[in-house]
Image (tube, helix red, strand yellow):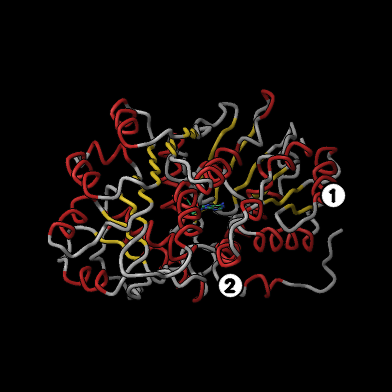
């Protein structure tokens, strides 16, 4: 229970990553390593080959990137020392973006190359010197064969979504590449599934690999009913929350999940000011004792609302939680399953309600793939006032949507098309809270929580 939860919390500091990486992790808002990161990072740092079975949404990208960033450390020489192969340009771009986030405080040079665009710009970037390269197999081979890319200094090779690469028929290119790159290297292979073909590849490609398997708890418990509301903005999310919580009888023990500590604090303070009932907030910044006390108070029924970030979600073992409200959508998709699993425990009926703005709907669709079901959507109740979206928040949402479209189609040029800083791509801001003055506006003096 509470103690159990504490044991589970390995921190990023435990991995002995350098300061630059820890700062970037903190800035990205990652409070603690996901299960795949907990298992993979120490092993990869120790130099082992890995065979990781993990889907998108588990945090697998950072699981291999952080050890690579530790190893490559700083800009050096002209030729890449780490190569990450991905089946699609969408994934290649996503990985590049993740490097952007995690390598922010390093001087590392990196880029993603893929087909569908002429190679000229990519060749120019390569010629300026690179430390890490992300690529789809065909384009990589093409540039290598043209003599534009030197691969003899590679020390780490990652095959991401290896099963998809095989399904897409990239095996011949991968084989050709394996012939030309240094034999002495670290190999990290990630796949969403354990198809025979992937196992075969792993036997051929990996040396004494450690297998790490993250089986997402992919099916939500049956006793939990789920519903999704598309809510345009933060102010309306609050209105919707207020609307629901008026029903004191059925919403008697509620956990409200947020993605960030800041939102958790703000939601908790808001509820407190409105005096809907006792509130506690638990997140990564709260000490162990505070967290245990909050949990106990919630368990005993003394506290009606628990506002929590995902860090806390796994440790909450309270039966009779009437509702889980996802105030925002988790980006680690597995966390959705963990969050909603906090209700409907021990055969009790439970309900999970998710609020998603237009940009978050993209992640809802991905979550639906992970849980292999559609979350039933309902229109906002008529009584809930739909507030206009403030300019800043509107910009943030539009930027997120543009960003998603750009990932799906690199040629897409939206209103917020962000010019790629070359060779160091500046990641589009897709996470964190919309900068919003709403919380400030609702602040009243005297609101204080124990
Ligand atoms: P991936 O499975 O690598 O596609 O990651 C899914 C999402 O989770 C991405 O948006 C990451 O930025 C985010 N993420 C990765 N690691 C963590 C973490 N430890 N805590 C919170 N979010 C994370």
Residue most extreme to the top: 347
Tell me the quarter of the picture where residue 444 sits: bottom right
Q: Does residue 380 appear in this view?
A: no
What residue sits right under mark 1 in the picture? 289
Q: Does the rendering let one see residue 203?
A: yes
- Which image quarter holds the C terminus? bottom right
Q: How many marks?
A: 2
Q: Position of residue 148 (x, y in %)?
A: 18, 65
Q: Which residue is mark 2?
A: 436
- Compare residues 208 and 123 and report the one nearer the observer: 208
Image position of 215 (left or right of 278): left
Q: Nearer the viewer, residue 253 or 166?
A: 166
Q: Residue at x 21, y 55 (%)?
A: 140
Q: Is 100 situated above or below 307?
A: below
Q: Residue at x 38, y 72 (%)?
A: 424
Label 1's element? helix
Structural crowding at the residue carrying mark 2, measured as other residues with C-alpha within 10 Å and reported as few (<14), some (14–19) or many (≥20): some
- Outermost residue to the left: 146
Residue at image location 71% in from the left, 44% down from the top: 254
């Amino acid at each position: 229970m509470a103690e159990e939860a504490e044991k589970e919390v390995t921190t990023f500091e435990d991995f002995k990553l350098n300061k630059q990486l820890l700062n970037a992790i903190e800035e990205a808002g990652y409070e603690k390593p996901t299960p795949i990161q907990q298992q993979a990072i120490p092993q990869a740092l120790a130099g082992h080959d890995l065979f990781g079975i993990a889907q998108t949404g588990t945090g697998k990208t950072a699981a291999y990137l952080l050890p690579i960033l530790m190893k490559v450390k700083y800009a050096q020489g002209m030729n890449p020392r780490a190569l990450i192969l991905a089946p699609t340009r969408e994934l290649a771009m996503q990985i590049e973006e993740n490097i952007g986030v995690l390598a922010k405080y390093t001087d590392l040079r990196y880029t993603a190359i893929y087909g569908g665009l002429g190679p000229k710009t990519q060749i120019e970037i390569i010629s300026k010197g690179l430390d890490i390269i992300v690529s789809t197999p065909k384009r990589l081979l093409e540039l290598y064969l043209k003599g534009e890319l030197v691969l003899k200094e590679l020390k780490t090779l990652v095959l991401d979504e290896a099963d998809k690469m095989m399904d897409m028929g990239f095996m011949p290119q991968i084989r050709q590449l394996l012939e030309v790159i240094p034999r002495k290297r670290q190999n990290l292979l990630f796949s969403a599934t354990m198809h025979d073909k992937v196992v075969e590849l792993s036997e051929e490609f990996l040396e004494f690999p450690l297998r790490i398997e993250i089986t997402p708890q992919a099916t939500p418990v049956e006793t939990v009913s789920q519903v999704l509301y598309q809510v345009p903005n933060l102010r309306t999310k609050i209105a919707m929350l207020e609307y629901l919580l008026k029903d004191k009888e059925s919403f008697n023990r509620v956990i409200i999940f947020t993605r960030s500590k800041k939102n958790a604090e703000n939601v908790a303070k808001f509820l407190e000011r409105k005096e809907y009932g006792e509130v506690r907030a638990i997140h990564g910044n709260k000490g162990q004792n505070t967290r245990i006390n909050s949990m106990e108070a919630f368990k005993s029924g003394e506290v009606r609302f628990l506002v929590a970030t995902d860090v806390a979600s796994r440790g909450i073992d309270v039966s009779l939680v009437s509702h889980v409200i996802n105030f925002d959508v988790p980006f680690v998709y597995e966390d959705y399953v963990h969050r909603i699993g906090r209700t409907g425990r021990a055969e009790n009926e439970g309900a999970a309600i998710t609020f998603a703005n237009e940009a978050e709907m993209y992640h809802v669709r991905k979550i639906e793939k992970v849980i292999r079901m559609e979350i039933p959507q309902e229109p906002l109740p008529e009584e809930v006032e739909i507030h206009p979206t403030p300019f800043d928040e509107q910009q943030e949402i539009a930027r997120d949507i543009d960003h998603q479209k750009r990932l799906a189609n690199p040629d897409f040029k939206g209103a917020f098309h962000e010019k790629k800083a070359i060779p160091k791509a500046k990641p589009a801001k897709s996470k964190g809270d919309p900068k919003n003055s709403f919380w400030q506006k609702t602040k009243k003096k005297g609101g204080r929580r124990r």
